[in-house]
Image (cartoon, helix red, strand yellow):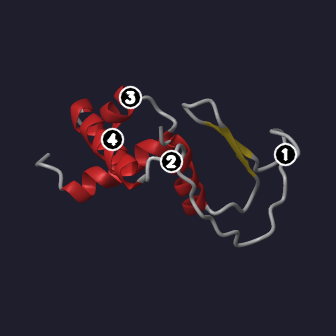
Amino acid sequence: MGRRSRAEIARLAGLYATSGMGRSEFCFRHGMALSTLNRHLNKQRQRNHAGNDGGGCPLVEVEMSAAVVPVIDGDQAGALKVLLQNGRSVSVGCGFDGETLRRLVAVLERP
């Protein structure tokens, strides 16, 4: 396989953020060097910190597109619970918007 474009590496790094896999496993499955993923994630982290005005944890404005319905428990049909590396978890029910979940997980995974 030839050299990947920056856009392709960014796409893969975005997939990693929501994959639930460790870095080594993700890189192995996608034929990507661990150093490439690490370098991209470090650059992304630096950009995120540079955008922060230094005031603690950055706040992100979100818009709710529909009413939130709480998930009763993990046994509910179609319910998913995502455990993030930083110890946080996100639970969603059937019919959730995958793109919104991907963006939320990326924000929650920021250091």
Tell me the tag on residue 25.
Answer: 3
Three-letter amino acid code at disc 1?
A: Gln
Other residues around mark 4 within 10 Å, as few (<14) / some (14–19) / many (≥20): some
| Residue 64 in the image, given as x and y percentages of width and height | 70, 69
Q: Residue at x 33, y 51 (%)?
A: 47
Three-letter amino acid code at disc 2?
A: Gly
| Disc 3/disc 4 C-alpha distance (Å) | 16 Å
Residue 18 placement, left or right of 23? right
The residue under label 1 is 76
Is residue 109 shown to the viewer in this render?
A: yes
Three-letter amino acid code at disc 4?
A: Leu
| Residue 75 in the image, given as x and y percentages of width and height | 83, 39
Q: Earlier in the sequence, mark 3 or mark 1?
A: 3
Q: Earlier in the sequence, mark 4 or mark 1?
A: 4
| Disc 2/disc 3 C-alpha distance (Å) | 35 Å
The residue under label 2 is 55
| Label 1 residue SS | loop
Q: Residue at x 76, y 50 (%)?
A: 78
Other residues around mark 3 within 10 Å, as few (<14) / some (14–19) / many (≥20): few
